[in-house]
Image (tube, rainbow, N blue to C red):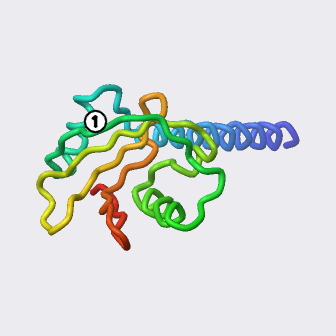
Amino acid sequence: MKTLKKIVVFILLVAVCGVIFLFCMKKDELSDKEKVILSNATERESYLNIKGWDVTQISSDEVQIPGDFEGVYKVYAQVQQKQSLPLAEYKGRSVERFLYRVNNYNGDSEIYAELLISENNLVAAALIQQIPDGFIKPIY
């Protein structure tokens, strides 16, 4: 009987370890699938086109993401969180910023699409109305 109990306990232990292993692997697979990789100008523009925006790139530069999200950047960070983009993971780091004029947004003022990218990974994306009290919206 003691041998049977040991075998059952061993089998249960192996099964629990297997479930934990599979869960961890599934979690890693999901996080890789959720990443948006944009490695060149064509891929960046295509990404915006798929989201429904006809765009023209107007600039690119390097920017520093603040260490603390306050004021307008707090709103910007909330927009990124809604889109499941990892902006918060990049606090205090430098990223590439690509700015596009949105040609097909209905309205009286110019609207811009902004992409923040680090090592080809999309960190943040937003539609921005650059006027006093303008909006910051998700890219979708």
- 130 is higher (above) or lower (below) than 46: below
Dot 1 falls on a residue whose secondary structure is: helix
In this rendered view, identify the residue nearer to me: 139 or 4: 139
- On the image, the x and y values in percent for residue 47 come to 25, 41
| Identity, as a three-letter code, of the amino acid under mark 1 | Arg
Quadrant containing the C terminus is: bottom left
| Residue 23 image offset from top left, x and y in percent | 57, 43
Q: Which residue is drawn at the image coordinates 46% and 60% (left, top)?
A: 76
User: Which quarter shows the N terminus?
Assistant: top right
| 133 to 52, vertically: above or below | below
- Residue 13 in percent (x, y) is at 74, 41
**Residue 15 percent location from the top left of the image:** 65, 40
Q: Does residue 100 sit above or below 139 in this rendering? A: above
Q: What residue is drawn where x is 59% and y is 46%?
A: 89
Q: Is residue 62 found left or right of 38 in the rendered image? A: right
Quarter of the view holding residue 117: top left
Residue for badge 1: 44
The picture quadrant where one finds residue 14 is top right
From this viewpoint, which residue is outermost toward the right? 2
